Amino acid sequence: MKRILATWAVSALLLPALLAASPLTTAARSQDSRSQDSRSQDSLAQEPTVKGFWQSTDDDGKPNGWFYFTETDGVFEGRLVKGFPKPGEKGKVKTCDKCEGALKGLTILGLPIVTGMKRDGLAYEEGRVLDPRNGTVYDARMDLSPEGDKLMLRGYVGISLLGQTKTWTRLPDNALPLDALPPAPKALTRGE
């Protein structure tokens, strides 16, 4: 009986190594790996994306901006396409006077506020978010809800722990006609 158990134990230890070296098993594993990659790409294609219209709100829950997200070569960008001044307010910042470089003095309507986001499933990383009120650019990441109806945008300095998260709500695809969207500022479209 001890001999049978010892033989079984040795076989149990050697069998995985023998199977791993087997050309048939290696081919099957390779095929399985390709299948998993394909399934992973398919599931990524089926997951919702950030593309489309989103609404941000102020601390009182009132809308303060609509954004339209697009994707170019795997990089996502969100432009401010509609603003909501508060009643009695003399007016929101109309231009990005405190911005630096090519953004300085540009009209904020149409301005890319969220830039450089790279998708990893429902997460978007390595991006930046601009606060046009003071010209500050923060590191940013976004997380999309599995249902695709909520977007958590986190702006931070240095590390994500030192930041703030705002939750945006998806708007219908027809929230604004695409031909009515404000254009990107000319200085940005010329590459300046």
Image (tube, grey):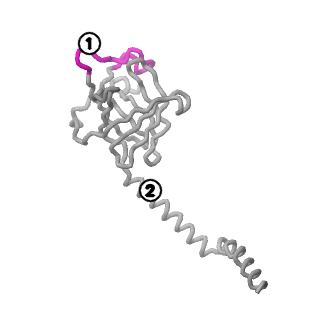
Left/right of residue 151 with respect to residue 53 in the rendered view: right
**93 lies above or below 19:** above
The residue at the point 51 percent across, 63 percent down is 34
Query: Does the stretch in magenta take in 99?
Result: yes
Between marks 1 and 2 in the image, the one whose residue lies nearer the viewer: 1
Image coords of residue 93 (percent x, y): 32, 17
The residue at the point 25 percent across, 42 percent down is 173
Left/right of residue 38 with respect to residue 62 in the rendered view: right
Whether residue 184 is visible: no
Front-most of residues 27 and 19: 19
**31 lies above or below 117:** below
Secondary structure character of the magenta stretch overall? loop
The quarter of the picture where residue 29 lies is bottom right
Mark 1 vs mark 2: which is more N-terminal? 2
Q: Look at the image and give the residue range highlighted in magenta.
A: 85-106
The single residue placed furthest to the bottom in the displayed view is 1
The quarter of the picture where residue 168 lies is top left
Q: What element carries label 2?
A: helix
The residue at the point 57 percent across, 71 percent down is 27
> Residues under labels 1 and 2: Cα distance?
49 Å
Query: Does the stretch in magenta take in 124?
Result: no
Q: Is mark 1 on a helix, strand or loop?
A: loop
- State the residue position of label 1: 90
The residue at the point 56 percent across, 71 percent down is 28
- State the residue position of label 2: 41
